[in-house]
Image: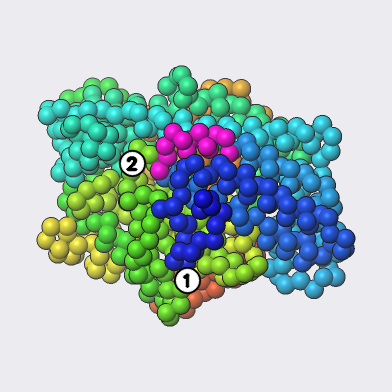
Amino acid sequence: MTNPLLSTWDTPFGIAPFNLISDDDFAPALDTALASHMGEIDAITSTVDAPSFSNTVEALEAAGAQLECVLGPFFAMAGADSNPQREALQRDFSPKLAAHFSEISANSALFSRVAAVWDARDSLDLTDEQQRVLMLTHRGFVRSGAALTGADEQRMKEIKARLAVLGTQFTQNLLADERDWYLELGEGDMAGLPDFAVAAAHAAGQEKGVDGPIVTLSRSVIVPFLQFSTRRDLREQAYKAWVARGANGGDTDNRAIAAETLSLREERAQLLGYSNFAQYKLETEMAKTPDAVRKLLSDVWEPAKAQANADAWVLGQMMRDDGVNGDLEPWDWRFYAERRRKDLHDLDEAEVKPYFQLDRMIEASFDCASKLFGLSFKPLDVPLYHDDCRAWDVTRDGEHVAVFIGDYFARGSKRSGAWCSAMRAQAKYPQAQTPVVINVCNFAKGDPALLSYDDARTLFHEFGHALHQMLSDVTYESVSGTSVARDFVELPSQLYEHWLEVPEVLAEFATHAKTGQPMPRTLLEKVLGAATYDMGFSTVEYVASAMVDLEFHDGSAPADPMARQAEILTQMGMPHAIAMRHATPQFAHVFSGDGYSSGYYSYMWSEVMDADAFASFEEAGGAFDTERAKALEEHILSKGGSLDAAELYVAFRGRLPGVEALLKGRGLAA
């Protein structure tokens, strides 16, 4: 039988035929696709024609289509619905793919052709996008080590292969720890838990095959438990298991992996002539230098820490009023912060949560996209990789724009967190193709599924990434959608979160799960009024993680990352009752691959822009101002990485922003 991954997909809009694909298809399909891709590379280098943009750079853009058809479905399934066979395939594929792309980036004949086109660029009459693609292609080869020779070239290949193995193992270890631990709750262990948290605990038990409610390490289950459980002993037990992920000893311990990863990154950077990995990594970002990142984080850290320390004093007093002696601990913060929120804002999450139904929030995110960009969403009945997944045909003025897939529920086979990816990116060369975009989240199941306000923000955040992919309008896939600087990629996603805060959006879509009634205006005002509540806590846990990431990479790699982490936090004056959002053994952003390594700061860098960008809507005709929406699509969402990020933002806003709007938006400045 023909391997479905290598066949022409006769499916609606060319979606992968998940109903025909088996795990046994991936390995032979990958081997075939790798050989095909290498044949396309050989054809480029063996041509007798002089190097040109068309026969070299565009030919590179067109190469590898079959490989994308194999890897798109595989990585979607491996990340969101893993199983032992897929995990084994990942471990096998990682070094194989690293070696494959290392061979291409080290291909001297190929690099010489790219370099020849680069040297002749001023005489080629290229479009702005073509000039950008040429620059990025040439720079990518140089930064990958194409100019290295001899022992240095060989060592670079070895480092890349080893880093690929380590990144995969880090992710799988974390998934294993998250999947294997749970705490069974007896009848007396549910004290304080509201109905939605009880329902989530029962659903988690069903998913694990346990007869009764449990607490798992899924954020959507454990955070409500830490917020509401009156059992301090159980909160401590659950919290310690949560922060111990990846650091439990044995085969799933990530600490040695982190140390080796940091050492190899430093060596990689030094082979390319950089003093350390942060200098190498940040060169291509908007920030450019570690000092620029450090300044941003420091400017935010001090006011955030001051607010957190003030809040800690109040929460500690509340705890002592309960007759609990000793220090406020990390497993106490969320519990007392939730009680304080109820006191300060007369806001109880158990009262709020029934108004945030998953289906209604999906509708809200779609409706905002319709009002802003004229998009329509029609359900698609197509086979997908899991029964939880849903798909929509996205159109504008009756024309197909994209396929959007949502995979929203937590399960043991899915890694933690939330993310957006394109199984197929938008492009016009070598032929027109529309994107297939997926949002993956980890919300607790329920009937109906209810979200916290933070969960709803996550849904809007990931859909902002999806819009960046779906509204892309460029020629070349390498600069399509979210293929932008890492500290710019979060701008569209974080900006889209603001529409959840628009009163008219909540008034229409925040309807009660049982009564169907809209959220009362008094409650809506409380929700919006409390939007910056506990911002000292959330800012401190984030900035601490970002600073540790930066310091790990800006200097010599630490032999003991955990000791270095503790040293950095001590120097910062980390409040006792707050932990890093992602401690080193769980820091998948940084250690599962290079994506956010030395770049976790980028969420805050982008937040500086998103606060300023949304202010431009408010200064104009309001959240749905048509001219501002048109400018956002024209200058940012449609452009992908076809122009420099700073240039795109200035085209949209007229200037670059300062940190003031961010501090004000977080309630950390007047």
Residue in front for this viewpoint, 183 or 576? 183
For the point 52% across and 74% down, which residue is it?
Answer: 631
Residue in front for this viewpoint, 127 or 307? 127
Classify the position of the C terminus by image quarter. bottom left
Which region is colored magenta?
81-93
Compute the Cα span from label 2 to label 1: 30 Å
Label 2 crowding class (10 Å Cα cut-off): few <14, some 14-19, many 20+?
A: many
Figure check: 508 above or below 345: below
Figure check: 104 above or below 49: above
Figure check: 528 above or below 419: below
Residue sitting farthest toward the bottom: 397
Q: Position of residue 499 (x, y in %)?
A: 36, 64
Magenta span dominant secondary structure: helix
- Tell me which amino acid carries mark 1: Val
> Can residue 88 be found in the magenta stretch?
yes
Q: Quadrant of residue 531 in the image? A: bottom left
Q: How many marks?
A: 2
Q: Position of residue 665 (x, y in %)?
A: 41, 56
Q: Position of residue 373 (x, y in %)?
A: 43, 74
Q: Can residue 72 be seen?
A: no
Residue 401's disc is: 1
Earlier sequence position, callout 2 versus callout 1: 1
Judge left or right: residue 513 versus residue 251: left
Mark 2 — residue? 411
For the point 40% across and 58% down, which residue is it?
Answer: 405
Label 1 crowding class (10 Å Cα cut-off): few <14, some 14-19, many 20+?
A: many
> Can residue 633 be found in the magenta stretch?
no
Q: Can residue 507 be seen?
A: yes
- Callout 1: SS: strand
Q: Position of residue 555 (x, y in %)?
A: 66, 32
